[in-house]
């Protein structure tokens, strides 16, 4: 079943989300104000679509994997700044709000992530956009991809919505 590998990784990492959807709250930074990098420069291919997508590292030390499958979204591992209690994983998807957890999660050792430079974003067309506003910050938003029809129905067991997270030393948060 598509997505089981990445979903299993997230489940094993202890990342769990309530089924809540919302538009971006006031104060959520707009990742679309940053110029985009070329997504193909960050593309990785796995043996299964759930292992394929885009891989990047932030100047602040988070390693992020954005799945080819829109429902799976993006998850990042590393020291997450500005959150108490401490966390080492943050994730968000089209169907699940952003969440922080402590899992001991580390990126796979065979993955060589490219740096997503400060002041840029990656928008691969799967509905997930991540930007690095400053060396210490990361913002990610997940929503229905523009390529989907506006009336794309929800799957029977989940609801599509807009979700996101902010990682910042001055306070990390998610919706």
Image: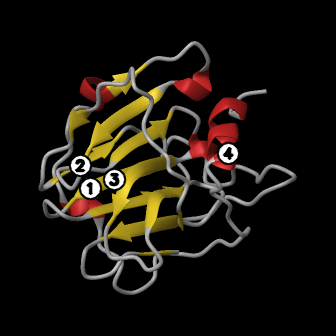
Q: CA distance from mark 1 to mark 3?
A: 4 Å
Label at residue 131:
1
Depth check, mark 2 against mark 3: the one in front is 2
Using a 10 Å C-alpha cutoff, classify the residue at mark 3 as few (fewer than 14 neighbours), some (14 to 19) or many (20 or more). Answer: many
Tell me where residue 48 sits by quadrant.
top right
Q: Which residue is mark 4?
A: 12
Q: CA distance from mark 2 to mark 3?
A: 10 Å
Local SS, label 1: strand
In the picture, the disc for residue 130 is 3
46 up-or-down from 143: above or below: above
The numbered mark, 3 or 4, whose residue comes first in the sequence reads 4
Rendered residue at 26%/55% (across/down): 131
Q: Are marks 1 and 2 in contact (CB under 8 Å)?
A: no
Question: Could you give the CA–CA distance between mark 1 and mark 2, rounded to whole angstroms?
Answer: 9 Å
Question: Are the two marked residues, 3 and 4, in contact with CB atoms closer than 8 angstroms?
Answer: no
Q: Which residue is located at x 65 percent, y 55 percent?
A: 14
Q: Report how far apart the C-alphas of labels 3 and 4 lie in the structure.
A: 24 Å
- How would you rate the neighbour count of disc 4 (Cα within 10 Å): few for under 14, some for 14-19, many for 20 or more? few
Compare marks 2 and 4 and give the one earlier in the sequence. Answer: 4
Question: Which of labels 3 and 4 is toward the front?
Answer: 4
Residue position marked by numbered label 2 in the rendering: 58
């Amino acid at each position: 079943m598509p997505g089981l590998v990445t979903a299993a990784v997230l489940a094993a990492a202890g990342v769990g989300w309530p089924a809540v959807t919302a538009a971006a709250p006031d104060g959520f930074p707009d990742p679309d104000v940053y110029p985009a990098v070329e997504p193909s420069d960050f593309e990785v291919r796995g043996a299964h679509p759930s292992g394929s997508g885009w891989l990047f590292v932030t100047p602040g030390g988070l390693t992020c994997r954005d799945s080819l499958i829109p429902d799976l979204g993006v998850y990042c591992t590393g020291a997450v700044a500005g959150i108490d209690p401490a966390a080492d994983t943050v994730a968000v998807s089209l169907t699940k709000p952003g969440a922080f957890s402590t899992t001991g999660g580390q990126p796979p050792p065979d993955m060589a992530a490219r740096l997503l430079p400060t002041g840029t974003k990656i928008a691969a067309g799967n509905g997930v956009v991540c930007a690095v506003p400053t060396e210490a910050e990361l913002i990610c938003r997940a929503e229905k991809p523009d390529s989907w029809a506006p009336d794309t129905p929800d799957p029977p067991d989940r609801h599509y919505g807009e979700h996101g997270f902010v990682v910042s030393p001055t306070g990390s948060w998610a919706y």
